[in-house]
Image: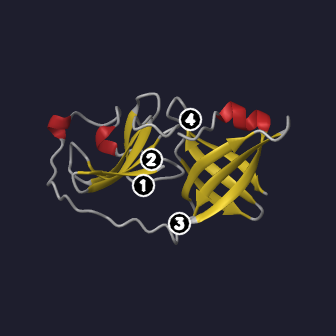
Amino acid sequence: MTDVETSSQKQYAINDNDSIAYSAFLNPNASCPVCGDHVFFYRCQNGGRVYFDDLGKPWEKHPCTTNKRKSSRHLTSTVTNKRKVIDYTSSIYKPFIIEKISYPDMEWILIQAKYNNYKIQVKFARKKALDANLRKVTFCMAAKQDNAYLVSYLNETGQADVIKGYCV
């Protein structure tokens, strides 16, 4: 994940190589284009875009920008442009930034990641991890649970999913 400065807003770009073209990025300082509230804007590697009120499980989308919302002509809102400071110290789920994926054997996949300002290694059952299609560009949030991590991510169809990995 790379920090990118854009008009005084910090964005986090996820690229799968060291080129300047980013396949996915997260803007934690975005504003809702409908109501103006502070939201997280995420563009995934397949080109999909989504606004979230908060990050991590259950990955609830911002209501103004979902297809389920009422027509915008029925919305009345005052644009506040307020920014919230996200403090993950008390949150169960924290950013899980995949830095490297390796395949040590036929049974496991080993992922090196940054979690809660620490570099960690987590092993995942190979079949489950391949089914999850976890890659360096996958934006994840994780919760530590005993000797394991529950990694929550958005799959390729934009649905929230969870995979369990074990501490190495």
Q: Which mark is residue 54?
A: 1
- Residue 58 at x, y = what percent? 52, 49
- Left or right, 130 with reference to 64: right
Q: How is the image coloured?
A: secondary structure
Q: Which residue is mark 2?
A: 60
Return the residue nearer the eye: 34 or 133: 133
Q: The C terminus is located in which quarter?
A: bottom right
- Closer to the chain start, of discs 2 and 1, is 1
The Cα–Cα distance between marks 1 and 4, rounded to whole angstroms, is 17 Å
* Eye-nearest disc, 2 or 1: 1
Q: Residue at x 52, y 37 (%)?
A: 17
Q: Which mark is residue 155?
A: 4
Q: Residue at x 21, y 48 (%)?
A: 35
- Amino acid found under the numbered disc labelled 4: Asn
Q: Which mark is residue 91?
A: 3
- Closer to the chain start, of discs 3 and 4, is 3
* Eye-nearest disc, 4 or 2: 4
Q: Residue at x 59, y 48 (%)?
A: 98
Q: Residue at x 21, y 43 (%)?
A: 34
- Closer to the chain start, of discs 1 and 3, is 1
- Amino acid found under the numbered disc labelled 1: Asp
- Closer to the chain start, of discs 3 and 2, is 2
Q: Which picture quadrant has residue 155?
A: top right
